């Protein structure tokens, strides 16, 4: 199997930084291009639960703009990396992007931010592993990298 395109989903946490470093090493060994994505969670599914003070579309637009700035800062010092901000269900968007762009591998952490998010949305890594169109390397950021 030839690995030419590696997808790295990030959430801008310190754990994501560790995963990016590991993926960078792997892609360097394979001479593969690194593709980094951040997914802005879509609020379409939750619109019945609350009444936002601003239209959901406007809020998502602002979230995307903020994510683009964070991505730029997050990738400082990393050369030849393609970055993209996606909007939707986190796991579904990672899988869709991998399919549409012909990724050869996904490298992602087993843990992102902790707390209520994991309880509400389940494990993104688990969903990606189950439905990915390509091999997925999961890394526990709490182990020595």
Image (cartoon, rainbow, N blue to C red):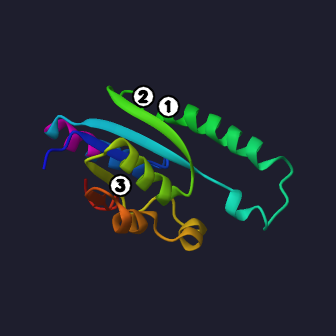
- Identify the element where label 1 is drawn: helix
Residue 69 appears in the rendering = yes
Q: Nearer the viewer, mark 3 or mark 2?
A: 3
Write down the residue under mark 3.
Answer: 108
Q: Residue at x 64, y 54 (%)?
A: 42
Q: Is residue 105 above or below residue 28?
A: below
**Where is mark 2, residue-wise?**
76
Choose mark 3 or mark 1, whichever is in front: 3
25 drawn magenta: yes
Please tell me which residue is depicted at 29% across the width and 44% down the height of the picture: 6
Question: Based on the displayed image, in which of its 4 quarters is residue 25 positioned?
Answer: top left
Q: Residue 13: give its label.
A: none
Q: Position of residue 74 (x, y in %)?
A: 46, 36
Task: Give the magenta range.
Answer: 23-29
Give the Cα separation between the discs numbered 3 and 2: 19 Å
Q: Position of residue 72 (x, y in %)?
A: 49, 30
Tell me what residue is drawn at x 34 percent, y 45 percent.
7
- Whether residue 18 is visible here, answered yes or no, is no
User: Between 99 and 66, which is closer to the camera in this rendering?
Assistant: 99
| For the residues bearing labels 2 and 1, Cβ distance under 8 angstroms | yes
Task: List the residue tagged with mark 1.
Answer: 73
Q: Secondary structure at mark 3?
A: strand
Magenta stretch secondary structure, dominant: helix
What crowding class fits label 3: few (fewer than 14 Cα within 10 Å), some (14-19), or many (20 or more)? Answer: many
Sequence-first tag of 3 and 2: 2
Badge 2 crowding class, 10 Å Cα cut-off, few under 14, some 14 to 19, many 20 or more, is few
């Amino acid at each position: 199997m030839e690995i030419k395109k590696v997808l790295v989903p990030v959430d801008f946490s310190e754990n994501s930084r560790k995963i990016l470093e590991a993926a960078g090493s792997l892609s360097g060994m394979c001479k593969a291009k690194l593709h980094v994505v951040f997914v802005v969670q879509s609020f379409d599914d939750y619109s019945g639960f609350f009444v936002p003070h601003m239209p959901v579309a406007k809020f998502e637009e602002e979230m995307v703009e903020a994510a683009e700035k964070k991505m730029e800062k997050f990738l400082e010092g990393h050369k030849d990396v393609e970055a993209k901000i996606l909007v939707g269900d986190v796991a579904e968007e990672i899988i869709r992007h991998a399919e549409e762009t012909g990724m050869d591998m996904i490298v992602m952490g087993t843990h992102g931010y902790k707390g209520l998010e994991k309880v509400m949305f389940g494990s993104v890594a688990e969903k990606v592993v189950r439905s990915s169109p390509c091999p997925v390397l999961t890394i526990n950021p709490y182990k020595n990298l």
